[in-house]
Amino acid sequence: MPPSKDMIGRVLSTGSATVTADHVAGFAKALGDANPEYRTIAPPTYPIAFMTQAMSGGMETFLELGLNFMTLVHGEQEFEYVRPLEIGETLTLTGRIADVYEKQSGSGGTLDFVVLETEGKDAAEKPVFYSRNILISKRT
Amino acid sequence: MALSAKSVAVGTELPPLTKPAITRETLKEYGPAAGDPNPIHIDDEFAKNAGYPGVFAHGMLSMGYLGEFLHKAAGGVANVRKFRARFAKLTWPGDVVTCKGVVTAVRDEGGTRLVDCDIWSETQNGERKVVGTATLALAN
């Protein structure tokens, strides 16, 4: 089933995870970013790795969304930060479907767009970051 | 060198950042570090079956490079407030990515100087691959 408008507003998944020194170091190394700040805080795009970890990977989520994993493309990504993520803290994430729409592709097929919004909150329930993610897949 | 709150103005260019050429090893390291299991970035056969000439870089790898570029321009990760990217064109193994940006607005909010920027990644032939916007807070 392709994604449908009925899915808009649905809470997709929630989860929590701890920002560990090893996970942050591995992520920073993969980017070749040797910023000494990463001993205590995480890189700007680290929430993408953290969200995957906290929500235990993508596959189930993509299936749940009705997206075709074979043709799945990350179209856009946006982050808004209240403050950096700190090593050692546990954050709770809530993801919801903000929008679903379709477009005709140049080759005549249908492209499905799903907009996911995720909020990360700290132990005091204070927001730390927001993420907005546009996923695109070709309908088969 | 980070941007200076005193001298920043519309049209000021952010100090560019050129990363080492992307290799297949870069992609093999980034995927697991970011929790991205998509074989399209590491398995040529899989990529060909999906209709591409071969493996290509994760959009989030280029966005990660832009993150490094931004925290350097802003003088710290905590000064990167908002960051958005659209994955317009694919980046391939062998490409050398340079991150660039220009200030589009300067405003003061509660004693903090905020600058909005257009940002992008481009490869060796000047082609823009990942394009977006960012808001940085500069210490006065």
Image: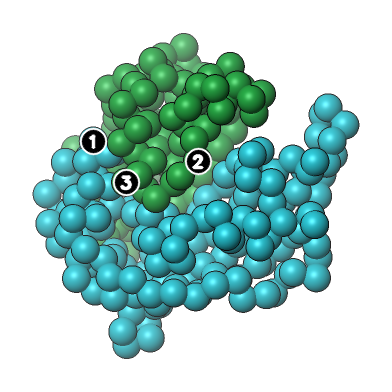
Point 38% across, 41% down: residue: B31
Q: In the rendered image, which residue does mark 1 sit on? A: A32
Chain bearing mark 3: B
Colour assignment, chain B: green
Point 28% across, 52% down: residue: A43
Q: Amino acid at mark 2?
A: Asn
The local secondary structure at tag 3 comes to helix
Q: Determine whether, in the image, residue A103 is placed left or right of residue A90.
A: right
Image disc number at residue B33 = 3
Q: In the rendered image, which residue does mark 2 sit on? A: B38
Can I make out residue B117 in this image? no
User: In the rendered view of the protein, which quadrant contains the N terminus of chain B?
Assistant: top left
Coordinates of residue B48 in the picture (x, y in percent): 60, 21
Q: Amino acid at mark 3?
A: Ala
Pointers 3 and 2 within a single chain: yes
Chain bearing mark 2: B
Q: Could you say which chain is coloured cyan in the image?
A: A
Coordinates of residue A29 in the picture (x, y in percent): 22, 41
